[in-house]
Image: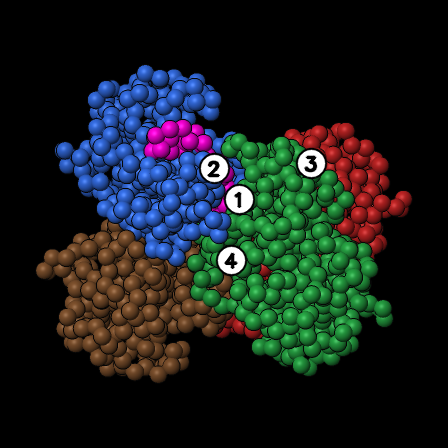
Chain colours: A red, B brown, C blue, D green
């Protein structure tokens, strides 16, 4: 971690959840950023190592209540708070402090849509200035943003695969089916019977079918890419792994494109990207090959059904799907190398 | 296990694989059947408990080479041999011995299709007399069959959900997408790097995309239900669980039907079935709720995409997807209660 | 499930926990017992299938509050309630109703020891009449018992291996070390952060070191076998599996005995037992080989350290370690075959 | 990875196994080392990403046969070859090339002991010059070593906990019991039925009881610390996790020491170490808290048995137990910071 006078001073609000701990893991060895404050209301007063023993080797500030932190001494604040609680926290921050918000509170730009899915929006005036932080697609906007709405995990996996193809007119904007499989850390660390080891191990089930909150977020960004409204099927599944999302995406081909054309478009689009890779024909991406890294792998396959193709996209939901992308966005906001703090290779097996 | 003079005399060919062991587990307490012979060429001479220690509490015949078993003393033979090897074994059996074949060798009735996917068909004359043993849909035919082609695991999960709806004209026969997630036991017990614990745990990947051998089997049976040829997308995934298949099936609604109509059709169709259950609206089936049992659970959901619905079907691939259904078929062939030997409830957690 | 007039009428108090569900699974097909009532205070009014969907195929009474059940119409009550709550419930039962208590409330016969570990003992007058229900060692007493204290899971695994050897004087009663590894279901279904999938998967840790409540229970029964007080080391570990306990037990040999003598003693002791098996020399028991069954497997090994031996004992903590042994005890109490309802073979893989 | 002219030029022999891939992961971002060659006879000609897709983001040399690599152009060679094959490879290396050998071939200094456990020793003349590379205990010797015998995974976990206590005379050198639990990656990537997902998931078993090859290695190093021969019990178990070893160690206290004294000795010994940490009283180390890192955590507990204590030690078997310690040793051999390339925090969950 940087400790020089000109290090980026950072605070993490909500450090006692999995995304908070993951931010600490990544920032602990960031060459230009310094962790100055960690908040966690219910654990205030504890050392981070009491809450997350795996971080016992890092010298860290003690967990505090948010009101006891001098937030105006920070350069940037990572908000990893529950949805519905972030609007007011961000609204109270000094204007000069930049924000990367990992909650969904600033992701939906249409206020009524937000309110349908999450309840009252308490900072609508800030919404217009927010930038949706899917880094590879929004890089220039992120650079200039004060408030970055860091994308959801499922949307990251789906949008990276679909947006360039919709923009290129190579897939129909109708009938897109996104079948996603996620590890359990996406549900957070709250104690719930449904997420006990015995309830999750050795099984799989779908949930939030046709009602999951990430659907409107995906549609918003695909609509941006397509140039008009897009509706998708999005069906998430919960499976026995701690980290990872695999999205299998079924699309109809448009304008004469074939699976090879789709692969070429994606490969071209992401050729220079450090974190997104299109795998060779015939290769299937696996979540275990991105575990612990900020990588996204995308594969493209012809379907047996004529006129259709299949996309497979994998990320680590806690890294590219949350804390890693948050650090990537912060790097852009502060003009440091985009890969700083994010260069670990995946951990396999 | 029955041992009376009129017990059904059974042999298992290929008893050293997972489906063989599962047949032993189920037949060990079958009230009307008796295990008279177990074959396993590479393990011939061993006790079954040396190969499968969990069966050490059952009194069983020793494993033998197939040529050393008096097969004509059997009433029924379960073939759990690799595909391509079964044709000749079955052709050599005495006519009076009934057969339940767990391999794919007699599942495809169109010989050229079989040969495209599996190589030369060596018993085409027997093929016409075979019955595809998806019990709930083929019960009468199975009763009279000498040779039952026991369905594949993925096809069982998909066809039980789709066939009644295609027969009722409530879903379009075009554009059906079957996204399946399977446990690893479906790949058998052969030592392969790809199936090592370290390669499978904590991850998921798709495989056999647009090329898996179960696609033509699904299409054959859906075509039978629809009354004309049907083509489907079938995309299997391998995930960290030993047992279980969950198929998420995306369909287009036809003839004005809604999701509720589909649910009503399936509920009506399976109302009297002991092993197939349609779950209530809003409930999502989970593989862990059928583990170790011969059950199939099916759920129906409206889609966010207009004019579409989602089906979710779960089975234990080794029971309803293989050995359990094989016993169910044998029960029909011999006129004993269809549930005999299959009455265990699922094991959870 | 039996439904004849002379079926054993059973109730399960605390049916919404894992041991309650496991009792239902086993009793659902018991040839002589009938489930007449299920209680679960926080879930009263629900169907069991809403709480445990895997039991949706069994016709069951609805969950009720305990005060709404006519307990005096029962022949036997299974108590699967938390410790500290059972004393008063049992004390209020009609004298003619038999009891199998799965809690620890009646396992410790020395009241001060009980109170050191669990708090106030509220039914000391009933304690003397209770029988510690480790079936293989206490069969005659269980037959005549009104109140059976069903053993803890760890104690079952340890005592079955050690008691006959202490009784035979073949191992020293000093310096016994019991290193146990358990699946997570032993911790119950209560929502706790520590038992979330993400906290348990892919790891192991020791807990309750030198302070676990099962230590005095083990010592009580080993003392009974040895004929005088015995103190043991007991170190439990929590690992990523839903079911199973493996205890590795380190002992000093006594009176000239060798590992082979120990194996012979155990094999002789359990030769006629349906559920306990001593594995052959050189074979190591594995928890996965007893999963879902009422079996216990025991192995004996010479140590590299002179004068010492190693015992390995495995059970399914929810079956032989809880609900299976409870049914086994009920069978004895009512004079039906001891294996009734318990004949399923293990589920592997 | 360093690419400057004065970068340490490294080769990995046997790069297609898990320890080889782990070396690549760690060296990929090492500030002073450069990967110049990777060998893997059966995969020669392939890209590393074909064998280990998780490394697809690293620019790497192609896999080659060992005879096609200019080994004399290297500064250091990591040998990750099977035991029995390393002696001759190392003997053929130019004298100026340093070696870190991850096989057991140079770990046992008593040739007859080596040959009892592994077969013929083919380079006895090199043995005397080798240094056993348990870094924290052998730092000065490693600095000057040409040939480092990198320790086994189990020995690393056990020796770090025990050696300082034996050296201090605080534990008896007799009757030490080491009960170890390991993840599966320690068994390597070779396709074996015993290591299939279905054979490992949801279970645990002991193996190599009283015969495992790591026992003499542990005894050698404990003997060095104690000043005379030591014999130990060592009982390894295989459990469902990919990475991690937890050793629970049972010792007798000596010379009036108590558990607190042991903790103080270890804490003092490792106070300045970057990778070894003694956890506070009452805290139990967990393997998941070191996953992916070069850390070792040690806890000390009083026993219920008088005069005894319990040690718990955890490492990631592929990092501190293999490739991480190998890099740590290379760092010492070349005088670069000992933590270079090893600063990632653990990955949790």
> What residue is shown at x 27% (from left), y 59% (from top)?
B24
Q: Nearer the viewer, mark 1 or mark 3?
A: 1
Q: Residue furthest right?
A: A5
Which quadrant would residue D77 be assigned to in this image? bottom right
x then y, percent, for residue C187: 46, 37
Q: Nearer the viewer, residue A97 or B173?
A: A97
Task: From this view, report whether residue A134 is shown above or below residue D72.
Answer: above
Q: Is residue C218 magenta?
A: yes
Q: Are marks 1 and 3 on the same chain?
A: yes
| Labels 1 and 3: the sequence-earlier one | 1
Task: For label 2, count other residues whose C-alpha is less than 10 Å away and answer few (under 14), some (14-19) or many (20+).
Answer: some
Q: Residue furthest left?
A: B5
* A112 horizontally vs D270: left or right: left
Which residue is tagged 1? D175
Quarter in which the C terminus of chain B is drawn: top left
| Labels 4 and 3: the sequence-earlier one | 4
x then y, percent, for residue A112: 63, 42
Q: Is residue A289 magenta?
A: no
């Amino acid at each position: 971690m940087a400790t020089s006078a000109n290090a980026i001073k950072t605070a993490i609000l909500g450090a006692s959840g999995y995304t908070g701990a993951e931010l600490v893991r990544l920032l602990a060895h960031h060459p230009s950023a310094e962790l100055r404050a960690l908040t966690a209301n219910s654990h205030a007063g504890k050392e981070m190592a009491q809450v997350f023993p795996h971080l016992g080797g890092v010298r860290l500030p003690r967990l505090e209540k948010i009101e006891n932190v001098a937030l105006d001494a920070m350069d940037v604040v990572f908000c990893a708070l529950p949805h519905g609680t972030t609007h007011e926290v961000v609204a109270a921050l000094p204007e000069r402090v930049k924000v990367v918000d990992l909650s969904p509170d600033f992701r939906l730009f249409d206020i009524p849509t937000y309110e349908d899915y999450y309840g009252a929006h308490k900072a609508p005036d800030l919404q217009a200035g927010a930038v949706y932080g899917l880094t590879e697609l929004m890089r220039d906007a992120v650079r200039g943003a004060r408030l970055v709405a860091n994308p959801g995990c499922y949307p990251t996996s789906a949008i990276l695969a679909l947006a360039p193809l919709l923009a290129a007119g190579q897939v129909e904007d109708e009938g897109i089916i996104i079948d996603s499989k996620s590890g359990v850390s996406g549900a957070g660390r709250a104690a719930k019977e449904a997420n006990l080891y015995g309830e999750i191990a050795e099984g799989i089930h779908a949930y939030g079918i046709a009602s999951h909150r990430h659907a409107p977020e995906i549609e918003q960004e695909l609509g941006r890419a397509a140039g008009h409204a897009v509706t998708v099927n999005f069906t998430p599944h919960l499976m026995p792994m701690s980290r990872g999302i695999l999205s299998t995406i079924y699309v109809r081909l448009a304008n004469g494109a074939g699976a090879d054309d789709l692969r070429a478009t994606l490969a071209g689009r992401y050729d220079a990207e450090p974190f997104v890779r299109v795998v060779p024909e015939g290769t299937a991406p696996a979540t275990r090959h991105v575990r612990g890294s900020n990588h996204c792998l995308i594969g493209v396959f012809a379907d047996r059904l004529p006129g259709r193709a299949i996309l497979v996209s994998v990320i680590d939901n806690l890294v590219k799907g949350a804390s890693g992308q948050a650090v990537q966005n912060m790097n852009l906001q502060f003009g440091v190398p985009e890969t700083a703090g994010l260069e670990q290779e995946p951990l396999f097996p």
